[in-house]
Image (tube, rainbow, N blue to C red):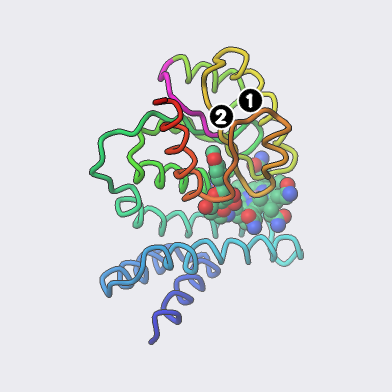
Amino acid sequence: MSEKESLHKIADAVLDYDGDEVVRLLRRELAAGGNVEDILNIGLIEPMGDIGDQFTDGEIFVPEMLMAATAMKAGLEVLRPILAESDAEPMGKILLGTVQGDLHDIGKNLVTMMLEGAGFEVFDIGVNQNPEAFAAAVQEHSPDIVGLSALLTTTMVSMRTTTALLKEQFPLIKVIVGGAPVNQQFADAIGADGFSEDAPGAAVLARRFMEELAG
Ligand code: B1M
């Protein structure tokens, strides 16, 4: 079987909502020396796009979307130690969360892993966090950067209120936003310092901000 075929088998297992099979195939792929980035992109992220399309087309409903997410997350947990591997001195502290009204956390979890891999100490406060919860967590952990994730067009408004509150209470803090409906234009409009469309990009952006903060 070619590497491409074996990666598509992982994707098929996500589409079959079969987390055990995802984990089994993924471990086999890693043992065979498979490329981690390809495993992530082709085996785990691509099928979630297909799941979204099936949901849009009315072929599946929320329970199926949740089962696919559970299978994908099982695979992500196998990759976590590899993605988060870092020998570097802590680069800085970053606080991450999904904004109020939004329960999507796979993208945020991926951002967490990439940031850990880039040498950041990450405080992940979870999903459905209101602006006050972000502000309280900043007070508690004193991060250099705050990252906000949103997957719904309806929760982007919470990104705006959270950014506004953080900027009012902590003017020096850098705010990064991301998630499928978010773009640079929106980030600029709400006064965020940065936007990244994916997890590796968020790590690059965060490193750049740390260099700027170091002066
Ligand atoms: Co939801 N859902 N969902 N869902 N869901 C979407 C987002 C949707 C596009 C599906 C669709 O209609 N095609 C749609 C949103 C439409 C819109 O607003 N435009 C949608 C909907 C409508 C809903 C509900 C409203 C459905 C309902 O109840 N009728 C409901 C809302 C619940 C709520 O949040 N209040 C809902 C529920 C769910 C589940 C709970 C069942 C489940 C989430 C499980 C979980 O996360 N634990 C789920 C899922 C799985 C999806 C899809 C299928 C997959 C999302 C995903 O994990 N993608 C999604 C369809 C899609 O995305 N095509 C969909 C993989 C992940 C790696 O990508 O999260 O985009 P993503 O993260 C990327 C980037 O966006 C970026 O980096 C990551 C990759 O490197 N990124 C950042 C993310 N955060 C970042 C932060 C950064 C930087 C980059 O800096 C801080």
Magenta includes 144? yes
Q: Secondary structure at mark 2?
A: strand
User: In the rendered structure, which disc, 1 or 2, sits on the residue that comes first in sequence?
Assistant: 1
Query: Which span of residues is magenta-colored?
Result: 140-147
**Looking at the rendering, which quadrant does residue 38 occupy?**
bottom left
Q: Is residue 65 left or right of residue 6?
A: right
Q: Is residue 36 left or right of residue 129?
A: left
Give the residue type that dot 2 points to. Answer: Val
Q: Position of residue 2 (x, y in %)?
A: 40, 85
Q: Position of residue 139 (x, y in %)?
A: 46, 14
> Callout 1: few (<14), some (14-19), or many (20+) C-alpha neighbours within 10 Å?
many
Q: Position of residue 42 (x, y in %)?
A: 49, 69
Q: Nearer the viewer, residue 120 or 136?
A: 120
Distance from mark 2 CB to nearest ligand 1 atom below 8 Å? no
According to the picture, the residue beneath numbered tag 2 turns out to be 175
Q: Residue at x 47, y 68 (%)?
A: 43
Q: Residue at x 49, y 64 (%)?
A: 41
Distance from mark 1 CB to nearest ligand 1 atom below 8 Å? no
Q: Nearer the viewer, residue 21 or 104?
A: 104
Q: Is any part of residue 66 visible from this angle?
A: no
According to the picture, the residue beneath numbered tag 1 turns out to be 163
Q: Residue at x 36, y 44 (%)?
A: 118
Question: Is residue 124 positioned above or below 179 on the image?
Answer: above
Give the residue type that dot 1 points to. Answer: Thr
Looking at the image, the residue that sits furthest to the bottom is 1
Q: Residue at x 26, y 70 (%)?
A: 31
